[in-house]
Image: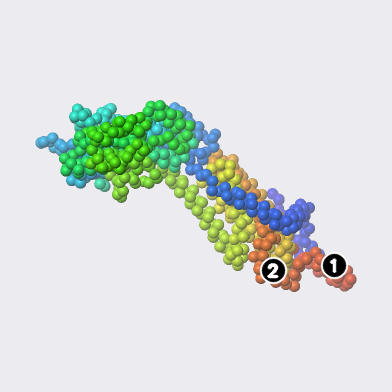
Amino acid sequence: MWPPDPAPKKGNDFKPKEPSATGLWIRGLGDRIGDFIINNNVKVAVSCMCIFLFFAFGLQYLKTSVQLLKMFDDDARIIKDYAWLEENLGKLVPMELVVRIEPELLYYDEPAEGSDHTPLNPKAEAATDKLEPKFRYSFLERMEMAGRVASVVEEYLGPDGAEVVGPPTSALTFAPELPAAGSSTASFLERGAYSRRLEASFNEFVGSDYLRVDKENGAELWRVSLRLGALENIDYGNFVDDLKQVTEPIMDAYLARDRILKQLDKDRDGRGYVNAKVGLLGVNYASQENAEEASEIGKDEHSRYDHLDATKVFSETLRDLLTNARVKLIDHDPNYHTQDRLAYIEKNCDYIVLVEPNEMYDMDAMSKSMKGTFDVTDHEYNGQDIPRMYDPQRPPVSLVYTGVVPVVYKAARTLLSNLIESTVWAFALIALVMSLVLKSLRAGLISMLPNVFPICVVFGYMSWTGMEVDIGTMMTASVAMGVAVDDTVHFLTWFRWGLDEGYSRARAIKEAYSRCALAMFQTTIIGGLGLAVFAFSTFTPTQRFGYLMVSLLAVALVGDLLFLPALLAGPLGRVFRPDHKARSKKDDDGDQEEASMETENSESPSAIESELEETEEPRVYPVHGRSRPA
């Protein structure tokens, strides 16, 4: 479209092309900026360093996000489709809980005499010698285990609670209503009959995809399926932690039940635990008013659920488990029960189970009058994946958290962490290379300040303003550092060339300005406008990549044209050539030397004529062993 003018042939009449008016204006502007920075280098460097440190300090508050649907614009078609589906059908993002019960805890009913029995779970039935049947769980009790997990999630996080998840689905969804917990003989018989009827449909439950048998060792896997809202502001990492806060106390209650029953049986010389008198202290059966209040709190706070009461979940589960074991249980809630009830427990019970400590309970005195005491106060989830009261490689009952939510969250979080790590490594490697090129470790580190400057300023601003960083945002950091390093190397190349020619640092900085300031400005404009096109994308990571790159390139230009020259003109600039000695062109005061040369030339006409003859040919500047036209 616009071909360049043909290059003129060199000859006796060859004259270098004069710069345009725009070029002269930009060069003059660069000279004025250079003079200002050189004359005020300390002020400029300190100001830039204060800005740098202020925003760098804010990086510790940087928030990251890996939520999938936040990656799309609000007007994107996929967002509208998700909104319609969730409004008309239900929540869409799947989350799965799997209750794992090891084979030694599985109890299967004995087959009738003369029947052709086909083992439902051969590996589990082969492991019956590992644990006595009275300590194992019937099919009904195993289904209740999955049901308890589903019901407590629905109570706290479901439609009646924080409204984070929809109604959970489990094998209990396809079963008849189960009998309540009870210690009477009638209740024991009823529950046994229910268990046998449910076990008769074992294969049907397996076919429902909510029950599986581990082919490796025969463990049963009971699935509880949840659905989260795709368009709600939920941090999946925090949600999984909150889910564990609710469900892990249930697993701890089952482990505590096993521990208590085994000790009771041992103290009774293997005669079992039925009718053993046990006092349960520190239980917390919240009233209906408190439960409703907690539910209202949950509706307003979807990120962290401070109302989740692990003691309530644990104590209710343990109470039902010991009741079904036909233990004579008397509980004491310090919020509702009196001292008289506590005295009755001390007088009539043989064992004490402390669920939650309280100043009403003198455990030292009680332990002297009891056959045994059990401390199960460590039942709140504290971030460990293995339950606290049982510490083998794999506990007999456990929960596995899986599905799209934790898997995608972990994959995206890992990718984001790797991007942050790669940015740090990029900084370290570039600093090393710069140190080798400049032949000084201090010079290499100082030269990296303008390169890190745009990252700290832009991301620090995002941190202070509460903007979240996603994968697309984090990708810009390494790219911006690469562009900034290019400009830094460009500027330092001409700065060092000036020093090699014998110029003072001030004149070397001005020479670098005149040589590359315009080129750095032009590359920033071209690169910024080219990348700004991505800002019109409906895919948020691409969109953020576009406008963040423009911002980073602009701040990088400020760092290379203001911050770097101020550092070079100040005391820190001495590290770039500590052993520099003046050469024949040494110019400690360039202006005075040029004036002196003009005076000498004016006194000798032959010198003037000689100078005019020399100006017919362009001056040359050696750059890395080559000549470059002025």
Considering only vertical position in the picture, is 546 above or below 157? below
Considering only vertical position in the picture, is 236 above or below 521? above
The answer to whether one can see residue 159 in this image is no
Residue found at x 56% / y 41%? 466
Q: Position of residue 112 (x, y in %)?
A: 13, 35
Residue found at x 29% / y 41%? 365
The answer to which image quadrant residue 569 occupies is bottom right
Label 2 amino acid?
Asp
| Nearer to us in this view, 366 or 327 | 366
Circle number at residue 17:
none
Task: Give how far apart the Cα atoms at labels 1 and 2 are.
Answer: 24 Å
Left or right of 311? Residue 431 is right
Decide: few, some or many residues near mark 1? Use Cα within 10 Å; few <14, some 14-19, many ≥20.
few
Circle number at residue 598:
1
Point out the residue furthest to the left here. 114
Q: Position of residue 99 (x, y in %)?
A: 31, 40
Identify the secondary structure beneath mark 1: helix
Label 1 amino acid?
Glu
Left or right of 555? Residue 212 is left
Identify the secondary structure beneath mark 2: helix
Residue found at x 54% / y 48%? 60
| Nearer to us in this view, 585 or 130 | 130
Q: Where is residue 197 in the image (x, y as percent from the top left)?
A: 21, 31
The answer to which image quadrant residue 509 occupies is bottom right
